[in-house]
Amino acid sequence: MKKKILYLAILITTTLLLIFFLQKFLNIEKKTSEKELSDQSVLSENSNNLIKNLKYNVNFENNTSYTITALESELFYEKGNEIVLMKNVEAIFVNTDNEFLKITSKNARYNNFSYNTVFENQIKIEYLTNFITSEKLTLNFEENVVIISDNIVYEGLQGIGKADNIKINLLTKNIEISMNNSKEKIEIISKNKL
């Protein structure tokens, strides 16, 4: 029982580190946004644009940045906003200390107006020596919320934790870790014996 409490504390601490890192990016005024077309290969099909090697950079006033790239993308407009459906995605947050948080996934839906991004399928999150995998991650810049869901596995130096949902409020730093079925428990496995 003590091991489970200890490793739950480790999972929460790592999640707090994730919050701290992301908060530097989500609570500040956006300075610039750039769109780079590496291949210049834009094809028109069904009034949507297909683009290879698309890259967006968002630079913030405090010298931090958010970069998202995709090997293949499709642009379309929804309610006046440019929406980008991405495949083979990598997003990197870089803070003022030049530390990075990296998110990779098979697919993402990026809103070029709000920068809100929904990552799906085989998500991997790397921060320092901590790794989280899941099937869905939502970065909501408008509500300052990060939601990680579907088969979450956290792996750090001390152990492994498994849950169904993590919701992080980046303003209040509140974290909710839960299972879809309230009768199931969050699983924590120690790498080392105490």
Image: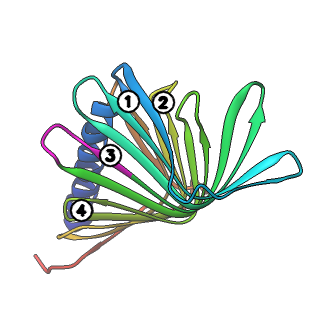
| Pick the front one: 21 or 93 | 93
The question of residue 94 being in magenta is answered with yes
The dot on residue 26 is 1
Q: Name the residue under label 4.
A: 7
SS under mark 3: strand
Which stretch is magenta? Answer: 92-98
Locate residue 3: give its quadrant. bottom left
- Which residue occupies the foreground of this view, 92 or 38? 38
Query: Residue 72 in magenta?
Result: no
Q: Which mark is residue 141?
A: 2
Residue 113: % across, % down: 58, 28
Disc 2 to disc 3: CB gap under 8 Å: no
Q: Which mark is residue 102?
A: none
Closer to the eye: label 2 or 3: 3
Mark 2 and 1 residues: CB-CB less than 8 Å, in contact? yes
Among the two numbered marks 4 and 3 on one chain, the one whose residue lies closer to the N terminus? 4
- Circles 1 and 4: CB atoms closer than 8 Å: no
Mark 2: amino acid: Phe
